Image (spheres, rainbow, N blue to C red):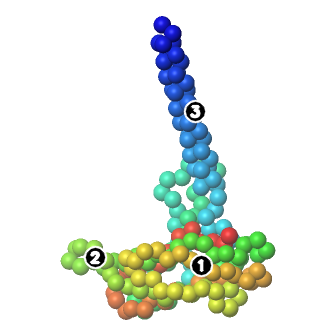
Amino acid sequence: MSGLGGSYHYESMGASSGAGWALLAVVISGLLGYWMVTTDPTEGLDYASGDLPEEMKRTICYSDSGPCPPTGFKWSISGSGVIQTRFEREDVDDRTEFRGWFRLEAAVLVQDEVRDCPTAVDWSLTADNKPVAHGTITAGSEDREVTGTSPPEARSILLTARRTDSLACRSTFQWIYAGLD
């Protein structure tokens, strides 16, 4: 009988421990979800002038405090087109490192079928008219991480994106999780 009691006690401890881990996982998931909903991923930048971006938002938001915060910005750019958007920096003293990813999506409708379109965009970021970062992205390629550091005293950031092709494709340039850390 003592062997059964020991075995039963061991299984009971295992079940209790498993419940504890499950509870811990639920608490951590809840805290992560709360953080994602209550933080503004585009923190550090406020739209000031130029081509008005469309805010990208989550499709599911667990917020009782209002609409979901934006997760980035996007712009439509026609063939050979250019967009320029000026942002004002929030918390000038605290945030200087750019964050996020650029993505380019492009498609064309051919005989009632949507097909990828090989567009490309040259982009640049300037801080108070001083070059900070630049690059090229093509539709269908991997997202490009936005890197660079804004001078601490700079007040405005200018994003310029120029299509390098003249194809008749609908092209969307996106800055996902745009912001400064």
Labels 3 and 2 touching (C-beta < 8 A): no
Please name whichever residue, 65 or 94, is drawn nearer the observer in this view of the structure. Answer: 94
Q: Which mark is residue 20?
A: 3
* Mark 1 vs mark 3, CA separation in Å: 41 Å
* Residue wearing tag 2: 115
Cβ–Cβ under 8 Å for marks 1 and 3? no
Q: Nearer the viewer, mark 3 or mark 2?
A: 3
**Cα–Cα gap, marks 3 and 2:** 50 Å
Above or below residue 33? Residue 72 is below
Q: In the rendered structure, which disc, 1 or 2, sits on the residue that comes first in sequence?
A: 2
Q: Which residue is mark 1?
A: 147
Residue that lies at the very extreme toward the top in this rendered image: 1
Regarding mark 3 in the picture, which secondary structure is present there?
A: helix
**Residue at point 52% right, 32% down?**
18
Q: Residue at x 34, y 89 (%)?
A: 167
Mark 1–mark 2 distance (CA, rounded to whole Å): 31 Å
Which amino acid lies under the numbered mark 2 shown in the image of this protein? Answer: Arg
> Which element carries disc 2, helix, strand or loop?
strand
Question: Could you tell me the amino acid type at mark 3?
Answer: Gly
Q: Mark 1 against mark 3, which lies toward the viewer?
A: 3
Q: Is residue 10 visible?
A: yes
Q: Amino acid at mark 1?
A: Thr
Q: Position of residue 89 (x, y in %)?
A: 71, 76
**Decide: marks 1, 2 in contact (CB < 8 A)?**
no
Report crowding for label 2: few under 14, some 14 to 19, many 20 or more residues within 10 A (C-alpha): few
Q: Quadrant of residue 114?
A: bottom left
* Image position, residue 163 (x, y; %): 44, 89
- Residue at 47%, 12% (x, y): give it: 4
Q: Earlier in the sequence, mark 1 or mark 3?
A: 3
Q: Secondary structure at mark 1?
A: loop
Could you tell me residue 8's position as x and y percent? Answer: 49, 17
